[in-house]
């Protein structure tokens, strides 16, 4: 039964992807000759692809009964698709992205996130993410930077260019501040103060806050908890993830995080995110201990 669910889910996702590619292909071609304000309107219309794809997948997951997601979201009714949001979340599995897309759907603008450059080679999805404004980041080594010093600012330049595009129309920017998925091995190597998290990295987050500045309406701090164990994406599609708990906490961005002085701004951001991470870690611990 689980295997059949997984096959049905994969089939539905594939068909949905092929279906949304019909209008997307026309819009991609339209980018070649569209200019000025018409180009900005076209880019905004293209976000419908994200809505259609996410909405169809959400209905698939519900129809197959893949999991039971409990969402706790204070001030949910105050959210709007006409505002810009920065979303941060702990990261444990590719399933996190599916859950975030599905359960923030319709409340805030569609999610866009920074992703590895290698993913552009995934058939259909890689190109779609590129033209829909999902920025790709390139991991560079110290040796590569030594050989080509211009690479030192590559990520900074990518964030700035992405944020310029985000300002075109309301967007939700997703940032996994841990920088990678949590595994027992990675957690053990860090010897950090968190029981269920990796240390947050504020570099990219700081760039987004700086570049988006007054555009951002709220920061949404999402905590995803898998009470029965973290599933792989394939296990999730087979219905082997019985329960998920999502906590969405809205925050105003503190004024000191937007200060002009870079050193003061980074120090304030580091302290703020650390306080959010400590609270997140405690929430996960108490939830798992209670068996909720």
Image (cartoon, rainbow, N blue to C red):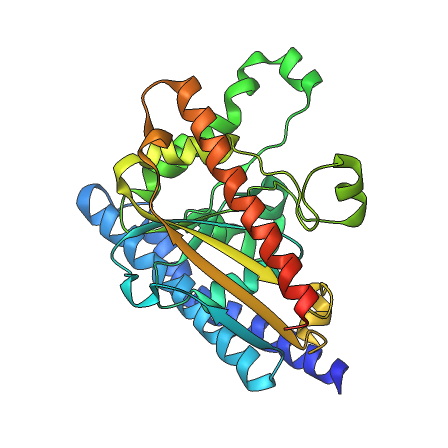
Which quadrant holds residue 201?
A: top right
In the rendered image, the residue lying farthest to the left is 37
Which quadrant holds residue 115?
A: top right
Question: Residue at the location (35% across, 50% down)?
Answer: 85
Question: Residue at the location (47% across, 72% down)?
Answer: 19
Q: Position of residue 212 (x, y in %)?
A: 33, 37
In the image, 66 versus 195, the foreground residue is: 195
Number of marks present in the image shown: 0
In the image, 152 versus 285, the foreground residue is: 285
Question: Residue at the location (63% across, 77% down)?
Answer: 9
Q: Viewed as shown, does residue 286 lie left or right of 272?
A: right
Q: Viewed as shown, does residue 130 lie left or right of 171?
A: right
In the image, 136 versus 202, the foreground residue is: 202
Work out whether residue 46 can be spotted: yes
Q: Tell me if residue 212 comes above or below residue 49 in the rendering.
A: above
Q: Viewed as shown, does residue 226 lie left or right of 204?
A: right
Q: Position of residue 14 (x, y in %)?
A: 58, 71
In the image, 285 versus 242, the foreground residue is: 285
For the N terminus, the quadrant is bottom right
Q: Position of residue 43 (x, y in %)?
A: 31, 51
Q: Tell me if residue 182 comes above or below residue 5 in the rendering.
A: above
Question: Residue at the location (34% across, 37% down)?
Answer: 254
For the C terminus, the quadrant is bottom right
Q: Position of residue 276 (x, y in %)?
A: 51, 45
Which quadrant holds residue 78?
A: bottom left
Work out whether residue 226 can be spotted: no
Q: Tell me if residue 34 comes above or below residue 289 in the rendering.
A: above
């Amino acid at each position: 039964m689980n295997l059949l669910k997984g096959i049905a889910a994969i089939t539905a996702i594939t068909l949905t992807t092929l279906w949304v590619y019909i209008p997307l292909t026309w819009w991609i071609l339209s980018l070649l000759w569209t200019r000025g304000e018409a180009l900005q309107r076209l880019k905004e219309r293209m976000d419908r692809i994200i809505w259609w794809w996410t909405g169809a997948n959400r209905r698939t997951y519900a129809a197959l009964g893949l999991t039971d997601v409990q969402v706790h979201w204070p001030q949910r009714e105050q959210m709007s698709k006409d505002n810009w949001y920065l979303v941060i979340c702990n990261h444990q599995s590719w399933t996190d992205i599916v859950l975030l897309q599905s359960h923030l759907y319709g409340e805030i603008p569609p999610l866009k996130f920074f992703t590895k450059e290698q993913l552009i080679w995934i058939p259909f999805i890689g190109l779609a993410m590129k033209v829909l404004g999902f920025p790709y980041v390139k991991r560079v080594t110290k040796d590569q930077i030594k050989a080509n010093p211009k690479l030192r600012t590559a990520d900074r330049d990518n964030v700035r260019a992405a944020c310029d595009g985000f300002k075109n129309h309301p967007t939700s920017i997703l940032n996994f501040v841990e920088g990678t998925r949590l595994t027992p091995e990675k957690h053990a190597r860090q010897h950090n103060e968190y029981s269920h998290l990796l240390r947050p990295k504020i570099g990219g987050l700081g760039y987004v806050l700086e570049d988006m500045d007054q555009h951002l309406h709220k920061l949404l701090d999402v905590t995803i908890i898998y009470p029965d164990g973290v599933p792989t994406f394939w296990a999730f599609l087979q219905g082997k993830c019985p329960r998920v708990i999502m906590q969405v906490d809205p925050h105003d961005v503190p004024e000191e995080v937007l200060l002009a002085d870079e050193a003061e701004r980074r120090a304030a951001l580091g302290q703020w995110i650390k306080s959010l991470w400590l609270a997140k870690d405690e929430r996960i611990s108490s939830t798992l201990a209670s068996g909720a």
